[in-house]
Structure formats: C-alpha cells, structure tokens
Image (cartoon, rainbow, N blue to C red):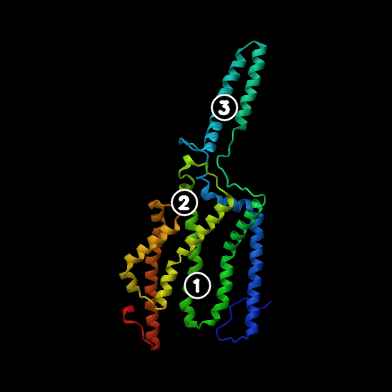
Amino acid sequence: MSRLRPIGHDQRLALVDHLDELRTRIVWSLLVFVLAFSVCYWQNNRVLDIVNKPVKEALSLNTSKKTNDPDKQNAAFDRQVGAFAKTVVPTLIAARAETKDATVRRQLTQAIKAARGVVAATPTAQTRRPVTFAITEPFLTTFKVAGYAAILLVLPFLLYQLYAFILPAFTPRERRAVMPLLLMIPALFISGVLFGYFVALPRAAEFLLNFNSDNFDIQLRAQDYYSFAILFLAALGAVFQVPVAVMALTRLRVVSTKQLRKNRGYVILGIAVVAAVVTPTPDPVTMLITMAPLVVLFELSILLARVLERRSASEEDESGFDDLDPTLS
C-alpha cells in the first residue's frame, strides 16, 4: 500500500497517485473500523450497559412515591413481602424452639423453609430494560449500537485520514489558518456528546419517561430509545460547533469580532432557540443547562478569534500586505 503520511504542499502528484492515496486511506479506515466494530460487538453487553445508563434512573422500579404504574406497584409489593418474610423467620425459629409439640414443630419448620424461600426469591433487579418486539430486533439493535460505538471510537483516525488527504492542497500560510478549525471540530463534537450523555440525556429521559405516567403503561422500546439517543447526542455534538462557525466567519471576514460583541444579545437569543429545539423537554431548567456551555463556548470563540485576528494582522504587516478591514484592528 502507498503512503499514509501527509504529502508536502510542494510535491506534485498525478491524478492516478491521488486516487491511489485516497484508496489507501479508505482501505485503512475500513480496516480500523472493522477492528473497532469487532471489539464493540464482542463487548456488546458493556456497550449496551453504557448506552442504557442515562435512562437507568428513569426506568428504576425502586421508588417510594405513590404511583399507578403496575410494574412499580408489583416491585414495591415484592420488596414488602420479602422484607416481611425476613422479619418473620427469627420469630418462627424462636417459636419452634419453645414448642414441644412435634406436629407444631414440623409446621413451623415448613413455615421457616417457605419464608426463607421468599427471602431468597425477592427480586434484586430494580431497573427495567428497553424492550424488543420483533424476533430479529435484539440482534439488529445490538448490531446497530455496536456500529455507532465503533464510529465514535475511530472518529479521530478517520478525521486524521481526511485532514492528511486535503491539507496538501493548502499553502503553509493557509494551513496555519485552517488547522485550528480542523482540530476543534472533533474535540468540540466529542465534548458535546459527553455533555449530552452525562447531563442532558438523563434529564430528558427522566422527564419524558415519567410524563403523565399515571395514565400510561410506559415501556421503552430498544430501537426507539437508541435512535433517539444517537440523534440527540449527535445534535448536541453539532451544536457544540459554535466556536468553529464563529472562527470560520471571522477568518473569512464575513463578520468581525467587534460586530459579534455588538450583537451578542441576538446571538444568545439564537442559542436559546437552538437549545429549545435540541432539548426534547419543555422545562426551562434543561434548556438553561444546555444553553450554558453554548454561551461559554461563544464567548471563548470570540476571544480566540480576536487573538487570531491580531496575529493575522501582525503577519500581514510584516509581509507588507496591510489590507485588513479597519474594524478588525
């Protein structure tokens, strides 16, 4: 196979060489993806446990609140029966020790055995799991989740192959301008996914799976939940690209940092609208939690764009090309 390292800008390759390089990078990307998918499918139980964790609390049967949910009522009844049997066993043992009647002792022994059986049979799993209905759904759903997990694992490698293929087309000066954006895209996407997984998705699941629960027998279908979770996390990963958008606009001189600061209120309003659309719950707390990091990222992106503007202006001054917009200085 041909080279995997980036080609220098001054190197000249024929069309066949470019196609050969592209083929090599695609083949390596597929091989790495297949390896990652094999690992994820092999460890599919752990992968599914990780994906199910955000809804674990929402699906919990261990609640002290009064509810009309039949599953939660049955679970509460089972716990109470187990606790009752556990307290009865010592009393029955003491009663058997005090009685002299053989028949009564035999009946107490049977009662003790039955009570201990109830204690041993008391359910310990207090969390429901997503349900499946079609005969092929468990396999296909596991296959799909393993595939998405593999994509997430190999994302840095895939992006490196993409960057290495397109970067030679840029001059060294253009490369210095583009590299910050290219490096920020995967970092911000992963940050958005992690924020959604640990913060936003559990709150959304808690609200949606308990909404009007007294009037519905709420069950969570596996493929519906995984599709929702994937789209939700991907949307947050995309929304977290705010700094990339800001830096791209300022680097292309569509807007200046001065204009962004001046119109900060409109941008925050737009972020609020985006947060309201991305979060599936109508409560303001979840929307504010989603808004907070976006506003912070926007402010940080303005600061970073301003630094890059000054550096660009300084480089152009040194090169004798001082044609910047006066508003940027």
For the residues labelled 2 and 3, say whether their Cβ atoms are less than 8 Å apart: no
Vertical arrangement, residue 57 with respect to residue 104, above or below: below
Where residue 204 is drawn, which disc sits there? 2
Q: Residue at x 64, y 52 (%)?
A: 137
**Which corner quadrant of the image does residue 111 belong to?**
top right
Where residue 182 is drawn, which disc sits there? 1
Q: Residue at x 65, y 24 (%)?
A: 113
Distance of mark 2 from mark 3, alpha carbons?
Answer: 38 Å
Distance of mark 3 from mark 1, alpha carbons?
Answer: 62 Å
As shown in the figure, which amino acid type bears the numbered disc 1? Answer: Leu
Q: Secondary structure at mark 3?
A: helix
Horizontal arrangement in the rendering, residue 325 relative to residue 88 (left or right): left
Q: Comparing marks 2 and 3, which lies closer to the viewer?
A: 2
Q: Secondary structure at mark 2?
A: helix
Q: Secondary structure at mark 1?
A: helix
- In the image, farthest residue toward the front: 215
Q: Quadrant of the N terminus?
A: bottom right
Q: Comparing marks 2 and 1, which lies closer to the viewer?
A: 2
Residue 61 horizontal/vertical position (percent): 53, 39
Where residue 86 is drawn, which disc sits there? 3
As shown in the figure, which amino acid type bears the numbered disc 2? Answer: Ala
Distance of mark 2 from mark 1, alpha carbons?
Answer: 31 Å
**Which corner quadrant of the image does residue 32 belong to?**
bottom right
Vertical arrangement, residue 241 with respect to residue 229, above or below: below
Residue 169 horizontal/vertical position (percent): 54, 82
Q: Residues within 10 Å of mark 2 (few under 14, many from 20)?
A: many
In the foreground, 140 or 91: 140
For the residues labelled 2 and 1, say whether their Cβ atoms are less than 8 Å apart: no
In the foreground, 75 or 224: 224
Dot placed on the residue nearer the N-terminal end, 2 or 3: 3
Q: Quadrant of the C terminus?
A: bottom left
Vertical arrangement, residue 193 with respect to residue 184, above or below: above
